[in-house]
């Protein structure tokens, strides 16, 4: 009897152990599968970690969407998008998400072309702020959900829209932030889970509300948002699960305006949120909002989003007296403003505490640059592409892309190529590396203000008329 009980216990133990091994193997397999799947996601503005880079798949070089320029080619699908928005595509699993503002009456006006006068758009009627989901493979609309409906609480610039911001996805949650029209969280089936009103955020200049453009950023179970209304600027971090505010830091003496997206970086036990602002660029402790470091000066219209590459945080802005580029040590602390703010040549690496290198000329005004390989690429609203050594800041080349080219959209890269989507309705594909070489000039048929997304060998463009998926011509 005892032998039977002993054998039975051994058998049960073996079964339990074998079951645990199977469960552990399944868990590891599931984790590995999820990790593989996540590599094809573009979960927020500028993709993973806001770097604007997606490698691992062959990407298209040449295509055409304009029938007047020849046969349409290289297009996987194209879908109309209602309303008006500069919201960039975001990819999660089999869904592509964008946001838009749909006016109750008439078409929303949009100024296209050079000559961005400080004018507000005549676009203050009743509208709906909407999040849309499309099938990544076919372009079929899966669902649309209204986040808010009403009269805009702030005006927008004539070249902007009421839906400039991109959504951010983390796990099974999607977050959209429309500034004065609120912060909203959905599940991936389009069901609204919660909303938060953070007040009027009227980012004004010349007495005109230029519109809101800072997309939300998500890290683990927290959301970071910038609310730089000149009258009451602040940065806040909220809980993803329910929108509860974790902390808020006032920025009254730090920032008069900014349009960039907050960037979150983790290094060991330190996680920081970096905000490109004017007159100060500031980094905060992500846990509690305590200031970590700051840089004074720069362009007075800070738009590009900070990002990380080669162990440094890259920040640029322009407009006014300066157009700096900073490569910042992530472990910086205190005031790290370069001593020679007027200098034109890059400071030597390590020249200033906390600064890897910096230069006060040549930064981007609207478009966020990209670091790909050993080089930093910056696009300008005048159609000039600049290439610098990413580790030193030394200029490699400065070339014009073409007549009428204006780079408002941020640059993205992959498969040895730099993609430059232009306001003139052309996407310029440039070979990565120290030699300037345009591989293709691709007609889109409509202007491109939104930054592209890349997923599994397909590039998703949002033009002023719709959403387009482009794939390599040979499949």
Image (cartoon, rainbow, N blue to C red):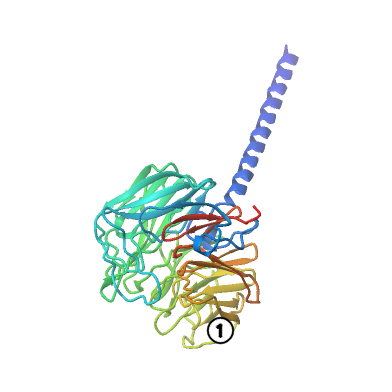
Residue drawn 46% across the image and 80% down it: 323
Quick one: 451 or 324, which is closer to the camera? 451
Instruction: Please give left or right for residue 62 compared with residue 300 in the image.
Output: right
Residue drawn 58% across the image and 56% down it: 74
Instruction: Please give left or right for residue 462 compared with residue 54 in the image.
Output: left
**Number of numbered discs:** 1
Quick one: 306 or 65, which is closer to the camera? 65
Place of residue 177 in the rendered image (x, y in percent of width and height, measured from the top left)? 37, 56
Quadrant housing residue 385? bottom right
Instruction: Using the rendered image of the protein, determine whether residue 315 is visible from the camera's viewpoint.
Output: yes
Quadrant housing residue 399? bottom right
| Quarter of the rendering occupied by the N terminus | top right
Place of residue 303 in the rendered image (x, y in percent of width and height, measured from the top left)? 42, 70
Instruction: Using the rendered image of the protein, determine whether residue 216 is visible from the camera's viewpoint.
Output: no
Residue at the outermost top position = 1
Q: Secondary structure at mark 1?
A: loop
Place of residue 293 in the rendered image (x, y in percent of width and height, measured from the top left)? 46, 72
- Answer above or below: position of 103 versus 158: above
Instruction: Please give left or right for residue 220 compared with residue 103 in the image.
Output: right
- Answer above or below: position of 269 versus 327: above
Place of residue 268 in the rendered image (x, y in percent of width and height, measured from the top left)? 57, 60
Crowd rating for badge 1 (residues with CA inside 10 Å; few <14, some 14–19, many 20+): many
Quick one: 271 or 188, which is closer to the camera? 188
Tell me the residue that label 1 is attached to.
346
- Answer above or below: position of 378 versus 175: below
Residue drawn 27% across the image and 70% down it: 231
């Amino acid at each position: 009897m005892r032998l039977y009980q002993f054998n039975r216990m051994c058998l049960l133990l073996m079964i339990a152990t074998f079951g645990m091994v199977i469960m552990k193997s399944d868990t590891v397999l599931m984790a590995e599968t999820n990790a593989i799947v996540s590599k094809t996601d573009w979960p927020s503005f500028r993709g993973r970690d806001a770097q604007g880079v997606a490698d691992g798949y062959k990407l298209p070089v040449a295509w055409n969407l304009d029938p007047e320029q020849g046969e349409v080619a290289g297009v996987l699908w194209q879908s109309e998008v209602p309303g008006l928005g500069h919201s960039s595509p975001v990819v999660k699993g089999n869904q592509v998400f964008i946001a838009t503002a749909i006016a109750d009456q008439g078409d929303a006006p949009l100024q296209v072309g050079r000559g961005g006068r400080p004018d507000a758009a005549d676009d203050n009627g009743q509208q709906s702020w909407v999040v849309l989901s499309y099938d990544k493979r076919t372009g079929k609309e899966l669902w649309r959900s209204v986040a808010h409906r009403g009269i805009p609480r702030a005006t927008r610039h004539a070249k902007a829209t009421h839906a400039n911001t991109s959504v951010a996805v983390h796990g099974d949650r999607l977050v959209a932030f429309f500034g004065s029209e609120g912060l909203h969280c959905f599940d991936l089936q389009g069901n609204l889970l919660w909303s938060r009103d953070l007040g009027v955020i009227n980012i004004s200049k010349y007495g005109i509300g230029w519109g809101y453009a800072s997309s939300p950023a998500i890290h683990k179970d927290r959301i970071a948002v910038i609310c730089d209304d000149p009258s009451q600027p602040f940065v806040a971090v909220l809980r993803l699960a329910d929108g509860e505010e974790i902390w808020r830091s006032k920025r009254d003496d730090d920032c008069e305006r900014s349009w960039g997206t907050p960037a979150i970086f983790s290094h060991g036990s330190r996680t920081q949120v970096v905000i490109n602002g004017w007159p100060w660029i500031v980094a905060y402790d992500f846990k509690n909002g305590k200031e970590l470091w700051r840089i004074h000066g720069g362009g007075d219209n800070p738009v590009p989003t900070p990002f990380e590459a080669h162990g440094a945080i890259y920040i640029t802005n322009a407009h006014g007296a300066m157009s700096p580029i900073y490569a910042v040590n992530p472990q910086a602390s205190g005031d790290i403003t370069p001593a020679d703010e007027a200098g034109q040549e890059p400071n030597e690496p390590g020249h200033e505490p906390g600064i890897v290198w910096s230069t006060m000329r040549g930064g981007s005004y609207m478009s966020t640059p990209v670091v790909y390989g050993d080089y930093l690429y910056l696009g300008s609203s005048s159609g000039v592409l600049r290439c610098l050594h990413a580790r030193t800041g030394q200029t490699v080349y400065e070339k014009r892309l073409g007549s009428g080219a204006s780079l408002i959209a941020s640059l993205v890269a992959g498969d040895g190529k730099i993609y430059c989507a232009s306001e003139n309705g052309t996407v310029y594909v440039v070979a990565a590396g120290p030699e300037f070489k345009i591989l293709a000039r691709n007609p889109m048929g409509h202007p491109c203000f939104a930054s592209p997304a890349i997923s599994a060998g397909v590039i998703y463009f949002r033009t002023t008329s719709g959403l387009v998926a482009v794939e390599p011509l040979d499949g």
